[in-house]
Image (cartoon, grey):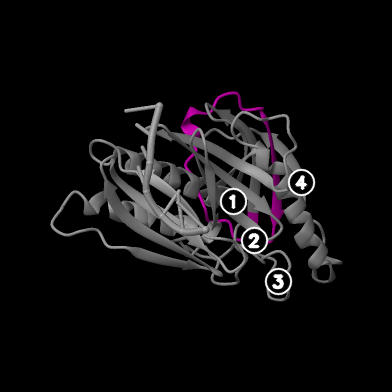
Amino acid sequence: MEGGNPGGGGGGNDVELLCKTLQVEHKLFYFDLKENPRGQYLKISEKTSATRSTIIVPASGIVWFLDLFNYYVSSSDNDQQEPLSKELQLDTKVFYFDVGENKRGRFLKVSEASVSRNRSTIIVPAGSAHDEGWVAFRNILGEINEASRLFTVPNQQNSEPSERLVGLSDDVGAGFISGHSAQAATSSDVNVERSVDLSPQDETGNSGVSKVIRADQKRFFFDLGSNNRGHFLRISEVAGSDRSSIILPLSGLKQFHEMVGHFVEITKDRIEGMTGASVRTVDAPQR
DNA sequence: GCGGCGA
């Protein structure tokens, strides 16, 4: 669990992908990016000495939260008109965003209404100057949004294997494990198109061992590396002089393995009898 | 060292 209680196995088998905390005035906000078989979600808790309240944001909504916080930050720069209240519907939940003000200052109230649970609310102080509370909150949402994409298995939609930029469509969330197996992997191509900035320029201590596999016309390199943020496995698809990579923190490697195993399992009728790709060990590539 | 929310 978050908040300095590492020993307690504390409820739920959901995997914690990322935890962050933010202090605004005397409140402490906990951000927990978690995952279970239904997908990723972000748990945001507000804790004061006396109370704690929590909202649960589906992973597909993180980017909308980011947008909304950007809206409230910038809307108070040009204080011509009052910032509007907003609603955000995600799955079966509705989130309400309202700005309020009292003698303590301005605040943003975010409340979650769902059919099953009681309404729960967190209140984010704007902070004293330049809405720095909202800005800090926004920045963390941005980091978590990036991390969430990093942890997301690349979507196996069967569109052109060309330059498909992953934009704001984050519908890869719940249900992709059980649901779409019928149309998944109708091609033996693997599309690797996401390059995540983990600043691999800083990487040190390349293990010196790289592996490469060949599938159809493509080559995929597997390189262990590390930088100031930890160890990772870089998987690169190399074609000509182009290389695109995904950077997989080692914390995600086991899940990655299980996920690949899952897709091997559900496609084994198709891949049975295919000759396996050859695997070689090569020298570590020069960056 | 706070306080908003809603009961």
Q: Where is residue A183 shown, x and y percent of the image?
A: 68, 75
> Amino acid type of disc 2?
Val
> Amino acid type of disc 3?
Gly
Label 1, on which residue? A237
Q: Earlier in the sequence, mark 1 or mark 3?
A: 3
> Amino acid type of disc 1?
Glu
Labels 1 and 3 positioned on one and the same chain: yes
> Amino acid type of disc 4?
Val
Question: Residue at 25% of width from left, 42% of height from top?
Answer: A103
- For the residues carrying marks 2 and 3, which lies nearer the camera in this image? 3
Mark 2: which secondary structure? loop
Labels 3 and 4 positioned on one and the same chain: yes
Q: Earlier in the sequence, mark 2 or mark 1?
A: 2
The numbered mark at residue A279 is 4
The stretch of residues the image draws in magenta is A190-218
Q: Where is residue A287 shown, x and y percent of the image?
A: 52, 34
Looking at the image, residue A160 sits to the left or right of residue A78; the answer is right
- For the residues carrying marks 1 and 3, which lies nearer the camera in this image? 3
- For the residues carrying marks 2 and 4, which lies nearer the camera in this image? 2
Tag 3: Cα neighbours inside 10 Å, few (<14), some, or many (≥20)? few
Mark 3: which secondary structure? helix
Q: Earlier in the sequence, mark 3 or mark 4?
A: 3
Which residue is at the front of the view, A82 or A220? A82
Label 2, on which residue? A190
Q: Are marks 2 and 1 in contact (CB under 8 Å)?
A: yes
Q: Earlier in the sequence, mark 2 or mark 3?
A: 3
Residue reaching furthest to the bottom:
A182
Predominant secondary structure, magenta span: loop
